[in-house]
Image (spheres, rainbow, N blue to C red):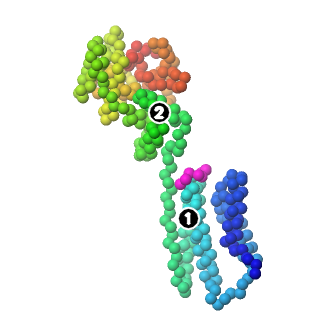
Amino acid sequence: MSTMISSKQMETKLYNLVSALADNFGFDADEAFEFARWETDVDHVGEILKVVDSTSKPVAPKKDEPKKEEAAKDDSAEKISTYRKNIDLWQRKLDEGSVKDADKQREKIEKEQKKLDKLLTLLKKAPAPAAKVEAKKPEPKVEAKKEKRIKRFSPVMASQLKTALEGVKMEMSDPLKKEFQQYIEDLTDDDFRKESMADHMRAFAKLKAPVEKARAEKAAEDTSDEEVDNGAGVGFHLMKKDDSDMEESDEEVKMEPTATVVDVTLKELQEISMTATIDPPGTFWDADNGRFVKGPDADDDEDFEETTFDGVKYVVGEKTGRIYEARDTGDVFAGFKGVGKFKKMTI
């Protein structure tokens, strides 16, 4: 007796054919098979399966064989299995990130889930069969995995993070890149949106900067500067802005990460009579008011002017007064116009 192929076997063979074509021509086999089956005016796969069923050798039914209703139920069970298989497969590909269009993949999963839900609803409304068949409970919908904010670390992002870390005298490393990625993922949606990626990098760098105490020996040697105690036992070398003969100390004092820093305008920063440079760059100890202060943040829309100061080339922001040292590897933030070592810059 010749062996007849079933419609299920034929469907599997058709899928294998589509998969072979997909591997050779570089398209999604599941998406192509789904399109040929459900998203055209004609169910091409279904038409082939009908031909297979019609050419199969009929077998005389036995007394104990299932009736038409039971055969239809078997067909429904097969469809349910196919829907669930597709949902699991497509969701797995979405979770692995191996799909080109995540939104389109979610739409496919939702469509397949709707088909499954509709078929299960129809089965519930159908008359109860003579033999009680326990139907499988519908599987819960799987929530789409939250997409990562940083899917990959591009060379541009790596360069920006390196610059931010160099601003606090730290070197770039792979562990720090991973820590920054996790830092970004842990932010709330509001906190993530209200700052640029560059601002997040600078904030991360400040958190990772090592805490160092000011060296007392340096304070003892530099007797020409005034020394001010910040209330925490750390002395700062200060510079009076109206004293042209006095130079700012090269000693940079690093503050505790938990210290409060007040944002001030460029004008307010320039009006402070005595300041001390604090690491990271752009932060100062305001001796007039006994507080840490920070100048204006970068403005992407402002224009810059080029200048040479003390033999070094700089660019200066027209709005913020932010000064960047021009280097071959990229501009590096150095301070503010009219503040600290740039107090005599007149551009």
Q: In the rendered view, does 101 fall on the left or right side of 239?
A: right
Question: In this view, which residue lies farthest toward the top?
Answer: 245
Quadrant the N terminus occupies: bottom right
The disc placed on residue 19 is none
Disc 1 to disc 2, C-alpha distance:
46 Å
Q: Position of residue 208 (x, y in %)?
A: 39, 35
Q: Residue at left 54%, top 34%?
A: 156
Label 2 Cα neighbours within 10 Å, binned few <14 / some 14-19 / many ≥20: some
Q: Residue at left 53%, top 42%?
A: 152
The answer, for residue 115, to whether it is visible in the render is no
The answer, for residue 136, to whether it is visible in the render is yes
Please name whichever residue, 146 or 169, is drawn nearer the observer in this view of the structure. 169
User: Mark 1 or mark 2, which is nearer to you?
Assistant: 2
Q: Is residue 48 above or below residue 246?
A: below
Q: Which residue is mark 1?
A: 113
Amino acid type of the residue tagged 2 in the rendering: Met
The prevailing secondary structure element of the residues shown in magenta is loop
Q: Is residue 309 above or below residue 199?
A: above
Q: Is residue 130 above or below residue 164?
A: below
The disc, 1 or 2, on the residue closer to the chain's N-terminal end is 1
Q: Position of residue 253 (x, y in %)?
A: 33, 24
Label 1 Cα neighbours within 10 Å, binned few <14 / some 14-19 / many ≥20: many
Q: Position of residue 146 (x, y in %)?
A: 49, 52
Q: In the rendered view, does 151 fall on the left or right side of 69?
A: left
Q: Position of residue 54 (x, y in %)?
A: 74, 77
Give residue 176's quadrant in the image: top left
- Helix, strand or loop status at disc 2: loop
Amino acid type of the residue tagged 1 in the rendering: Gln
Give residue 175's quadrant in the image: top left
The disc placed on residue 172 is 2
Residue bounds of the magenta highlight: 95-101
